[in-house]
């Protein structure tokens, strides 16, 4: 067994102490002063106990343990998280770009080469990336390891601290007093007066230990517990079913599936209502109304809520059962099964239908206009011509959000939302002449040679779509609990002081005191009682050194 792993026997009282102990667990004698000078500056912090990371360092586990218990490494991890978080704010995260837009194209179009690099490095989804979650996990492990490494020895030292102390223990404390003229009655009176100050008193022969505010020593560990719960709650948000924040677009009369519910729930937009401020109402919004036009005072969506009874059957058609009807207003969500459906905004730019007509080579209109429903277009229909000639129209291909023409000649769509529709029409007249045209907004391309007929765009109709936000957060309780526990730890660590006073009456009065903060306050508290009984005055060794330096 190496020297640092040997048990240490106290030369004064004979107590056998565990490896790495600086102060004897029984009498408080400094039994390992060389070790203390190398490892720990404040021997009173874990008096009578050893910190694992300062003792053992031979095995692989011990090396990993030392890495995670190192305050320096913990600060480095925090710095890396802070830097990564800052990088994530340089450009908007993918969550904040328009719904349905290709992320790669968006960053390239708006931010050029830097945006492309930002996307390729994965910074567009930085906070859900595996390496950012790994950094948070490492921080949680560091906090847990450091708390165990220092918290367990602290608990042992406070639980097992003895009452009788070696004379050197008294002299080593910052606050010290020795009065040979004091009697045992004076000492007992002093102890009783301190007990009235809410000190807990323990006695062993002619020695006393008075203590209060021990909870203060656990303040940092309560902080750590709160931080760990916060980190766990934050990381759980990236696990399926724990956190959901999705946008739902629903036009009037449309029934849509709610995302993230495994096809179990649907809603129908029965009616979307927008109320605007009256320009002549004499309100504070009059000037804004003059400059900007109409302003919405309220918008709401009246919905029918359905449950899909066949959601458990893969590939089955939805069997919708009406469950409820509700009005969703701003800040008044519809709640169901742990979900909250909020009224987020509205969109009146969505395309509902497009109207076309057929023209000849000279640009003359030779057919009645015909309309294409962009959400559910008909594949075949007949259009009457101006000279009683019928045209058979067949929709060969359709892309709601046109991206490009595929290798097989089909149209590829970026999203199912009709933002940039494109069509391939087949036009057949009474003589069975077939012609093909590729139609984009205000653009027609003849696919077949020498077309006699051109399909031309005439007009477009938009529709009002309600934009809802579906949220579910099972981590909120954990995050709130962690934050509250953290604040409790801050309060305990900041406003409660751990105070210990050791008194011995073998040779008059010997008194020593230690606190984790605010030595001025404990000195004042003790001196008020000592002076009242004419027993002298304690001296704060640090204050004495300071005063001597000031005089010099």
Image: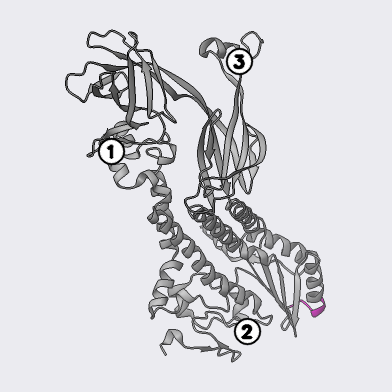
Q: Helix, strand, or loop for circle 3?
A: loop
Left or right of 516, for residue 135: left
Which quadrant is the N terminus positioned in?
bottom left
Identified at 35% across, 27% down, the residue is: 420
Left or right of 428, for residue 93: right
Identified at 60% across, 82% down, the residue is: 25
Q: Which residue is mark 1?
A: 114
Q: Which mark is residue 26?
A: 2
| For marks 1 and 3 on the same chain, the one whose residue lies earlier in the sequence | 1
**In this view, 56 is above or below 339:** below
Q: Helix, strand, or loop for circle 1?
A: helix
Identified at 26% across, 20% down, the residue is: 444
**In this view, 529 is above or below 79:** below
Determine if residue 330 is in view: no
For this rendering, which residue is in front, 133 or 193? 133
> Residue 94 placed where, x, y %?
40, 40
């Amino acid at each position: 067994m190496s020297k640092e792993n040997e048990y240490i026997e106290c030369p004064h009282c004979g107590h056998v102490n565990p490896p790495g102990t600086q102060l004897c667990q029984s009498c408080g004698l400094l039994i390992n002063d060389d070790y203390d000078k190398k490892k720990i500056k404040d021997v009173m912090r874990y008096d009578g106990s050893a910190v694992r990371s300062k003792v053992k360092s031979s095995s692989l586990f011990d090396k990993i343990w030392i890495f995670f218990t190192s305050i320096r490494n913990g600060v480095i991890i925090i710095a890396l998280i802070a830097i990564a978080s800052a990088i994530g704010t340089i450009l908007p995260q993918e969550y904040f770009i328009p719904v349905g837009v290709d992320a790669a194209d968006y960053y390239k179009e708006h931010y050029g080469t830097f945006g492309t690099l930002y996307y390729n490095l994965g910074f567009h989804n930085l906070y859900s990336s595996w390496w950012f979650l790994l950094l948070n996990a490492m921080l949680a492990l560091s906090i847990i390891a450091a708390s165990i490494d220092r918290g367990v020895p602290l608990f042992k030292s406070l639980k097992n601290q003895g009452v009788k102390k070696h004379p050197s223990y008294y002299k080593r404390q910052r606050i010290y007093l020795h009065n040979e003229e004091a009697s045992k009655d004076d000492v007992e009176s002093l102890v009783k007066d301190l007990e009235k100050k809410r000190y807990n008193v323990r006695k062993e022969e002619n020695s006393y230990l008075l203590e209060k505010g021990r909870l203060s020593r656990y303040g940092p560990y309560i902080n750590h517990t709160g931080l760990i719960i916060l980190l766990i709650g934050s990381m759980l948000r990236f696990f399926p079913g724990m956190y959901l924040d999705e946008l739902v677009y629903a036009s009037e009369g449309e029934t849509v599936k709610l995302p993230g519910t495994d096809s179990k729930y649907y809603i129908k937009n029965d009616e979307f209502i927008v109320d605007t401020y009256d320009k002549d109402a004499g309100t504070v919004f009059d000037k804004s109304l003059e400059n900007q036009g109409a302003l919405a005072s309220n918008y709401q969506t009246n919905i029918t809520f359905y449950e899909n009874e066949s959601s458990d059957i893969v590939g089955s058609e939805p069997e919708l059962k009406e469950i409820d009807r509700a009005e969703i207003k701003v800040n008044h969500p519809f709640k169901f099964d742990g979900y909250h459906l909020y009224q987020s905004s509205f969109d009146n730019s969505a395309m509902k239908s497009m109207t076309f007509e057929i023209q000849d080579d000279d640009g003359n209109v030779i057919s009645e206009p015909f309309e294409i429903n962009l959400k559910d277009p008909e594949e075949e229909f007949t259009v009457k011509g101006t000279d009683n000639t019928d045209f058979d129209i067949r929709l060969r291909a359709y892309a709601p959000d046109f991206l490009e023409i595929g290798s097989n000649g089909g149209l590829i769509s970026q999203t199912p939302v009709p933002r940039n529709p494109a069509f391939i029409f087949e036009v057949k007249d009474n003589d069975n002449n077939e012609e093909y045209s590729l139609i984009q907004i205000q653009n027609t391309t003849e696919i077949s040679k020498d077309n006699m007929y051109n399909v031309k765009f005439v007009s477009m109709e938009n529709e009002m779509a309600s934009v809802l936000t579906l949220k579910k957060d099972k981590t909120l309780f954990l995050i709130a609990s962690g934050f509250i526990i953290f604040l409790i730890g801050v309060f305990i660590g900041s406003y409660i002081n751990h105070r210990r006073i050791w008194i011995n009456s073998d040779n008059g009065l010997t008194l020593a005191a230690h606190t984790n903060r605010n030595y001025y306050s404990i000195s004042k508290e003790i001196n008020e009682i000592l002076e009242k009984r004419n027993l002298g005055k304690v001296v704060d060794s640090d204050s004495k050194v300071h005063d001597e330096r000031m005089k010099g």
